[in-house]
Amino acid sequence: MQRQLRAALIQLSVGKGLSKNIAHAFKMIREAKSKCAQLIVLPECFNSPYEAAKECDIYLVGGTIPEKVDDKIYNTCTVWDPKGEMILKYRKLHLYDVDIPGGITFKESDILTSGNKLQTFSISDNIKIGIAVCYDLRFEELAKLYRIMNCELIIYPGAFNMTTGPIHWELLQRARALDNQMYIFGVSPARSEKGYIAWGHSQVTNPWGKVIVQAGYVEEIIYCDLDFEECSTARKQLPVFSHRRTDVYNTILVNACRD
Ligand SMILES: NC(=O)CCC(=O)C(=O)O
């Protein structure tokens, strides 16, 4: 069965007008489709209509949008199948509350509520993909759970900033990819001139922890041809997953929780 897939990561330039943003995303999605992409990903903090997935006959990871439910707002990523149906909704699990003097101070929890579920989808029944968002990239436990669930790719729509981006964005993705022997996508908006300034540098990392393609900071689409047999090969050749000493880790964990 086919285990190859052409993906496009759209490092979108996002402005203030919602309808303008949607029209622009549509144009970029069509462009990626014209280059034969089957899986197309938009960045964090963006909204895209289901029509695009249906019209282009692709899987679309629609970046993230603020999702209002009763009195709560979540930072939510939706995924759409080629029939234009929404197949999952993932709510950002870890909220970005940080204070780095001289760098960035941010408190997502002032506005947002965190999700509490992991979400996966499958393409061709034999490629399983997990979804997470931006700051979630820092949490190895989350990526490990997706690995335990047999995912071979985690997609992180994200928008790292100019303080943490230069030092952590690439490194974290390589770490998640290598630890879990899977592909990792980090998909950022293009860098804007004002407001929250995103680092850009959307990236694809392979199951060996190697960056196979990385964008600059302006708007662009990066493409990659994935072969999921590379995950199987890496996992066979270096079977770290089955070498884990969960018996030891779990005992220590249980004892540490008792103390
Ligand atoms: N929007 C976010 O979650 C930003 C995460 C980030 O920049 C980081 O350093 O982590």
Image: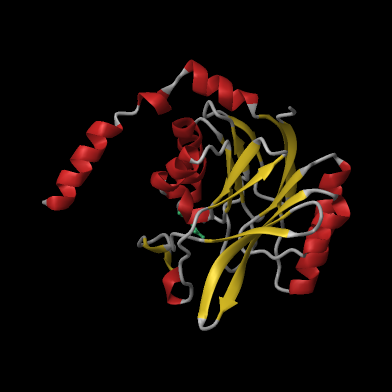
- Indicate left or right for 125 with 117 as reference: right
Question: Considering only vertical position in the picture, is 42 above or below 37?
Answer: below
Q: Residue at x 70, y 65 (%)?
A: 47
- The reply to whether residue 162 is in sight is no
Colouring mode (rainbow / by chain / secondary structure / one colour): secondary structure
Q: How many marks?
A: 0
Question: Residue, x 50% and y 41% (percent of image)?
Answer: 149
**The N terminus is located in which quarter?**
top right
From this viewpoint, is residue 32 visible? Answer: yes
Residue found at x 36% / y 23%: 243
User: Relative to the observer, which residue lies in front, 196 or 98?
Assistant: 98
In this rendering, is residue 80 above or below 196?
Answer: above
Q: Could you tell me residue 145's position as x and y percent?
A: 44, 44
Q: Residue at x 51, y 83 (%)?
A: 71
**Res 195 quadrant in image:** bottom right
Q: Residue furthest left?
A: 259
User: Could you say where residue 230 lies in the image, as x and y percent from the top left?
Assistant: 61, 24
Picture coordinates of residue 59, whole percent (x, y):
75, 49
Q: Quadrant of residue 94?
A: bottom left
Left or right of 218 on screen, residue 156: left
Frontmost residue, 24 versus 256 = 256
Judge left or right: residue 230 versus residue 256.
right
Percent of width and height locating residue 143: 46, 43
In screen coordinates, is 133 left or right of 253?
right
Quarter of the image for residue 89 reads: bottom right
Residue projecting furthest to the bottom: 71
